[in-house]
Image (cartoon, rainbow, N blue to C red):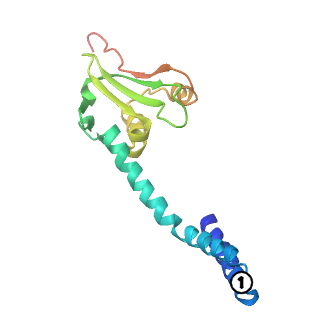
């Protein structure tokens, strides 16, 4: 909406300065600058869309793809294959870093008792609905601890779920 308003306003200014330059026979520099600005605003949506597509391709190359299904969680990248079945899941942790707003600083770690597991950057987790699936599949997931992790800006880890111990004889 703001982009459309900026384009309309810059187009009106471009028309006004061009008409003024034609009438006066001077002021062509301002008219040319106004037309260039209006043209730039016109192409911003296409430039933004192309940039978003390029960023998504770059993110997929770096982070890989994430599959969350009935079997479990699987992350596959260029040189990476991590996976864990729901039946093998022993704990879920959140790891945070101080890398800040310009870089990924929040990771889901899903681990098994055998030491194997899957580390999922938050951006990838968000696009695949990992958190909603964890909340649905894992009774006792500690949402308060998850909220604490979300507010962390330092290197830390937060255990948000562990598999309950089975009761002997049950």
Location of the C terminus (image quadrant)? top left
Q: Which residue is mark 1?
A: 21
Rendered location of residue 5, percent (x, y): 65, 70
Quarter of image, res 132? top left
Between 116 and 35, the one lying in front of the other is 35
* 117 sits to left or right of 138: left
Task: Name the outermost residue toward the bottom.
Answer: 23
* Residue nearest the viewer, comparing 1 with 69: 1
* Identity of the residue drawn at 49% across and 59% down: 48
Q: Quadrant of the N terminus?
A: bottom right
Q: Is residue 115 left or right of residue 135?
A: left
Residue shown at 34% from the left, 49% from the top: 57
The percent position of residue 169, horizontal first and vertical second, equals: 26, 11
Picture quadrant where residue 148 is located: top right
Number of residues whose C-alpha sits closer than 10 Å to that of mark 1, classed few (under 14), some (14–19) or many (20 or more): some
On screen, residue 24 above or below 105: below
In this rendering, would 122 be left or right of 2? left
Left or right, residue 24 beside residue 68: right
The correct choice, above or below, for 155 with respect to 6 in the image is above
Please name the residue shown 31% across and 42% down the image.
Answer: 61
Assign a secondary structure to mark 1.
helix
- From this viewpoint, which residue is outermost toward the right? 24
Closest to the observer, 52 or 165: 52
Please tell me which residue lies in front, 8 or 132: 8
Residue 125 % position (x, y) = 40, 39
Horizontal and vertical percent for residue 155?
51, 20
């Amino acid at each position: 909406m703001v982009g459309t308003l900026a384009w309309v306003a810059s187009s009106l200014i471009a028309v006004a300065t061009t008409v003024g330059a034609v009438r006066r026979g001077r002021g062509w520099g301002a008219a040319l600058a106004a037309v260039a600005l209006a043209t730039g605003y016109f192409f911003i949506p296409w430039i933004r869309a192309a940039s978003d597509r390029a960023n998504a391709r770059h993110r997929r190359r770096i982070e890989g793809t994430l599959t969350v299904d009935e079997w479990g969680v699987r992350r596959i990248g260029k040189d990476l294959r991590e996976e864990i079945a729901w039946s093998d899941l022993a704990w879920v942790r959140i790891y945070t870093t101080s890398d800040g707003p310009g870089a990924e600083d929040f990771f889901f770690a899903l681990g098994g008792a055998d030491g194997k597991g899957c580390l999922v950057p938050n951006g990838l987790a968000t696009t695949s609905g990992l958190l909603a699936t964890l909340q649905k599949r894992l009774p006792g997931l500690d949402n308060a601890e998850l909220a604490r992790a979300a507010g962390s800006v330092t290197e830390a880890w937060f255990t948000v779920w562990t598999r309950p111990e089975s009761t002997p004889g049950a």
